[in-house]
Amino acid sequence: MNSTPANLESSLSVPSVQELAFQRPEKVPARYIRDQDGDGIIATYPSHPSLRVPFIDMAKLVNADTHQKEELRKLHLACKDWGVFQLVNHGLSNSSLKNMGNQVKRFFELPLQEKKRWAQRPGTLEGYGQAFVTSEDQKLDWNDMIFLKCLPIQNRKLDLWPQNPPEFRETLERYSEEIREVTMSVVKFLTMSLGIQDKEISESFREGLYDIRMNCYPPCPEPERVLGIAPHADNSGITLLLDCADFPGLQFLKDKKWVNVEPIEGAIVVNIGQIIEVMSNGIYKAPEHRAVVNKLKERFSIVTFCYPSPHMDIGPADKLTGEGKVAVFKKLTHAEYFRKFFNRDLDESFIDSLRV
Ligand code: OGA
Ligand code: NI
């Protein structure tokens, strides 16, 4: 590629997909149409029982006397073979999840002009708008979103935090604190399932960065020709996704097939991000995933990208290298890692660029 590098830290402004959908078009504008699999159809596979995203029960992980060993084994296989699992008994109450979902729904129901009070400003990704639109000829996702840095508190840009609905800010504040608790437990168990019990890694998520992306996928007249979010792996430590719909939209690539995540009330979808892929020395994989859209129904999701503290280097855990075990990834400082990420070549695999 000899084109000028895209600025991946900001997004060009494009029309609201919700507004487009309100006009009830019969056809989707060309900028959203994808030529997938060569025939223009977004192939979806029904979730086969043998291809079901694994379940992990946090109550069993916590209980050292009884089921912990068995559940840690399940966790290990889930992270190694899938890179994703549905987490139940994670400690977040159903009412807390419902509140967060309701606030997000109510925000997206506001008139466009009102939502635009919290629109992305030129040169940043935060705020209300669309993500990662870097060129005028890029294919667009069937998605509107609002992206906010939530933790640590000093990273918040409150001028981009909606004040309508009135409880939005307070609910998001509480939700991000609760998500941090869950993340720290999950990462602790990940280090246990890796057999390294690395306190430095799990503790680094206490001072970690928590960015939340709230997605709205409006109904689409030609759902088989568009994507809500194009295939990608997350650049996080781990990602915690709250699915507010009662029908599937999120899909993970497993054995070359796209597998639906069936939403379960009260569950959180946890996937490995590229930082944990690096820290686990490639034992755990950051999976490719995407979102598809529905012809009749709108879908919302609340996605928290959880990163270790900026003081933590991003490289394979010490206990997984040395003594005959080779590091498959380089060790970078947090700043180096993100510089590399924001200057990455979109035609190359980012994770491969981190290999030794
Ligand atoms: C993301 C993502 C999927 C979804 O925001 O990175 O993968 O279902 N979202 O919203
Ligand atoms: Ni993602």
Image (cartoon, grey):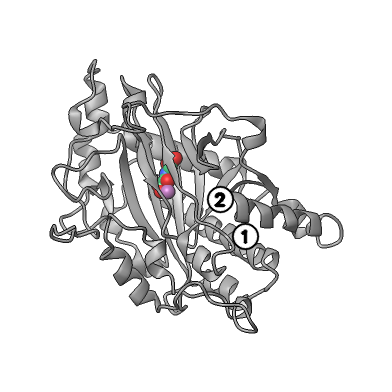
Q: Earlier in the sequence, mark 2 or mark 1?
A: 1
- SS label for mark 1: helix
| Residues at circles 2 and 1 in contact by the CB criterion of under 8 Å | yes
Residue drawn where x is 23% and y is 19% of the image: 27
Q: State how far apart marks 2 and 1 are (Cα).
A: 9 Å
For label 2, the residue is: 270
Q: Quadrant of the N terminus?
A: bottom left
Q: Position of residue 337 (x, y in %)?
A: 37, 72
The answer to whether 152 appears left or right of 87 in the picture is left
Q: Is residue 46 visible?
A: yes
Residue 221, above or below 77: above
Which of the 4 image quarters holds residue 6? bottom left
Camera-nearest residue between 17 and 231: 231
Residue drawn where x is 57% and y is 68% of the image: 280
Camera-nearest residue between 164 and 31: 31
Disc 1 marks a residue whose amino acid type is Val
Which of the 4 image quarters holds residue 210? bottom left
Q: Quadrant of the C terminus?
A: bottom left
Q: Position of residue 37 (x, y in %)?
A: 36, 33
Q: Position of residue 167 (x, y in %)?
A: 41, 45
Tell me the crowding category of disc 1: few under 14, some 14 to 19, or many 20 or more residues within 10 angstroms, Cα based: many
- SS label for mark 2: strand
Disc 2 marks a residue whose amino acid type is Val
Residue 25, above or below 182: above
Q: Position of residue 291 (x, y in %)?
A: 41, 37
Q: Is residue 163 visible?
A: no
Q: Which mark is residue 186?
A: 1
